Image (spheres, helix red, strand yellow):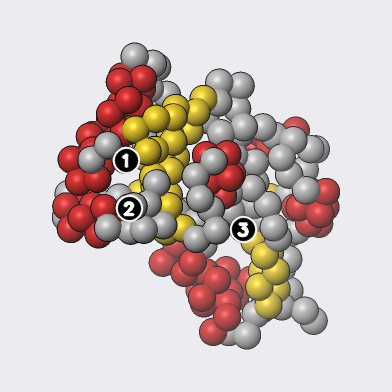
Amino acid sequence: MERVIYIIPTPIGNLEDITLRAIRILKESDLILVEDSRVTRKLLNNYNITTKMISYHAFNEHKKTDEIIDKIDAGFKISLVSDAGTPSISDPGFLLIRACIKHNITIACLPGPTACITALVKSGLPCDKFHFEGFLPVKKKRAKLLNIISNYENTTIIYESPHRILKTLNDLNQFCGERNVVVIKEISKVYETAYRGNIREVIDSISNSKLKGEFVIILDGKK
């Protein structure tokens, strides 16, 4: 009996951004581990997938991991998804993958959508080498990390929410000066927008726009 966990990237906006293989495996699975069933249900309904979902998110992943390992050992075909993008990239998944490796369970990770790479390529900033920081700390160690980022010579990728985007950009302006930056919101959605310029120019542009959706900040390296 094959013991395997399937890591399935899901669309970050447009529901068409999913592979045929991903759809097939989700249909064939016995269980799908999801962050929020309300979000994933929209995707499953769109492709007539009726597989049972069970909750697996940042607040229960420590408790659920052993249970999932037991189900895989019992022969269940299980897939892991996040609300959007590739699991474990600023989303739950790492703990389960590590536990599966420890128990000699095969990791079948499908290629697919991830906001950081999409935004990096679209930015037009150098993408041969880059640093991915995900979401910055809100308070503890934030200033220390911003100082480190300010000295990176390669492009930096940062995720941010709509209610903190201006604060983070102002902090970057304080630590990095008038460095070039590209901020992209709502990737692959109807209102996808890219703001380009130096940090101060982008702050001015975003301040006059509707702050909605997730943001990806692509910061140029130190010259």
How packed mark 1 is, by other alpha carbons closer than 10 Å (few <14, some 14-19, many 20 or more), is: some
Instruction: Give the answer, above or below, for where 177 lies relative to 137.
Output: above
The quadrant of the picture occupied by the N terminus is bottom right
Residue name at image x 43 percent, y 34 percent: 183
Name the amino acid type tagged 1.
Arg
Q: Residue at position x 32%, y 25% from top?
A: 201
Q: Could you classify mark 3 by the number of other residues whose Cα lies within 10 Å: few (under 14), some (14-19), or many (20 or more)?
A: many
The residue to which callout 1 is attached is 179
In the displayed structure image, the side of residue 93 where residue 78 appears, left or right:
right
Whichever of callouts 1 and 2 sits on the residue coming sooner in the sequence is: 1
Q: Is residue 172 visible?
A: yes
Q: Amino acid at mark 2?
A: Lys
186 or 88: which is nearer to us? 186
Left/right placement of residue 82 relative to residue 24 reads left
Label of residue 72 in the image: none
| Closer to viewer: mark 3 or mark 1 | 1
Identify the secondary structure beneath mark 1. loop
On residue 222, the disc is: 2
Disc 3 marks a residue whose amino acid type is Leu
Which of the two labelled residues, at mark 3 and mark 1, occupies the earlier sequence position? 3
Q: At which x and y percent is residue 13?
A: 61, 34
- Kindly report which numbered mark, 2 or 3, lies closer to the viewer in this rendering: 2
Report if the CB atoms under discs 1 and 2 are less than 8 Å apart.
yes
Q: Residue 80: which disc?
A: 3
- Alpha carbon separation for disc pair 2 and 3: 38 Å
Q: Secondary structure at mark 3?
A: strand
Place residue 90 in its image quadrant.
Answer: bottom left
Q: Position of residue 34 (x, y in %)?
A: 57, 50
89 or 104, which is in the foreground?
89
Compared to 8, does 83 lie above or below? above
Q: From mark 3 to mark 1, how far is it between C-alphas?
A: 38 Å
